[in-house]
Image (cartoon, helix red, strand yellow):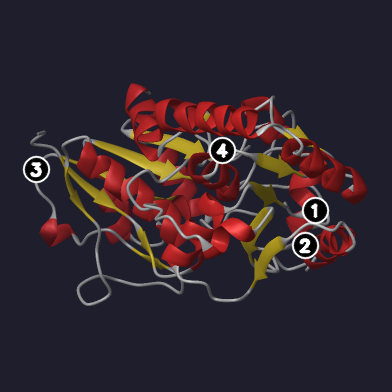
Amino acid sequence: KFDMKVYCVQYSAHAGKWIYNGLFAAWKHLGYEAYSPDSTNVQTTTKMIWPCHEETLSEDYYLMATADMVQCKMTLNSVKNSTKSFLFVQPTQYPLPWGKHTNFTNLTPKKWIDELNELDNVIYWTFADIGDGDYYHLWDKKVHTIPLAFDSFGYKPTVNERMKQFDIAFVGGWANNGFDEKRKIIIDIFSKFKDSGLNCGFFVNKNLTHQQECDLLANSRVTLNIHDAYQRILGLDTNERTFKSLGLNGALVSDTVGQLNRIFPEVKTSLNSEEIVGLTKNLLDLSEQELIELKENNKADILKNHTYVNRIEALLAL
């Protein structure tokens, strides 16, 4: 048990909610006195809740937040007075057409970026590989890559015989990021599976519960991952579904994305929808024992190397 307190940002909805739930649980697992706020006692924005008020802070604390929440003197002082702040940063420029939209670029005013750059107790990080582009040019310190991970505390699957009928499963949303490019990709892939003869458990914007999603992925024979157009083209990041699918199921086919292939080179991927179906059938053609061994090996690798505990340990090592 550490005496150090940790104040961790909270998202109220969408993917950020589950990501930061996993990070928060990891802090607690590592023995820190972790606090994640609720909307009754903290300043709120549209999606995020700032971790603390100045009057709630202890003498020694870590802060985990997003840099675009630093918009006033109070939030800056929370960072300045911390023992260490781990700030998630967005690109300050990004390739077109995506760079035209606020979903892809930094929202921290230049005034506060300059203030943050003066602090010695700040670690900048992001989920994406930094790449060759000068995407983070206004952040003067090194921006570290800490990929997404598997929430080993939040996902507890149960055996579900009905869900075992599915040869392949996918749970997700249309995820319109401002350009609505993913919808076309999803429909194209699903259309090829429609005539494949496989029993597909595909659920898009169906509001499955957290447990239903967990059980569906864990009990299906194989899982499917689909990324957005910018991820396919730039290859800088992979979604949390990569880690979730491998951690819960262990057998994954996906469209091709650079970061996924770099982290998990054994996962079979393609940008051709018909080939994705073929890769799925190749997995399903394995003997039962071969498929079980593949799954167990991949799940063991996730639990050893790719949980949110691993990611917090990587941040602390910086």
What residue sits right under mark 2 in the picture? Answer: 182
CA separation, marks 1 and 3?
A: 45 Å
**Dot 3, how many residues are within 10 Å of its Cα: few (below 14), some (14-19), or many (20+)?**
few
CA separation, marks 2 and 4?
A: 24 Å
Q: Position of residue 259 (x, y in %)?
A: 67, 33
Determine whether the residue tagged by mark 4 lies in a helix, strand or loop.
Answer: loop
Q: Amino acid at mark 1?
A: Ala
- Mark earlier in primary sequence (2, 4): 2
Q: Amino acid at mark 3?
A: Glu
Please name whichever residue, 236 or 162, is drawn nearer the observer in this view of the structure. Answer: 162
- Mark earlier in primary sequence (3, 4): 3
207, above or below 297, in the image: below
* Residue lying at 66% horizontally and 70% vertically, measured from the top left: 204
CA separation, marks 3 and 4?
A: 44 Å
Determine whether the residue tagged by mark 2 lies in a helix, strand or loop.
Answer: helix
Pointers 2 and 4 in contact (C-beta within 8 Å): no
Quadrant for the C terminus in the image:
top left
> Nearer the observer, disc 2 or disc 3?
2
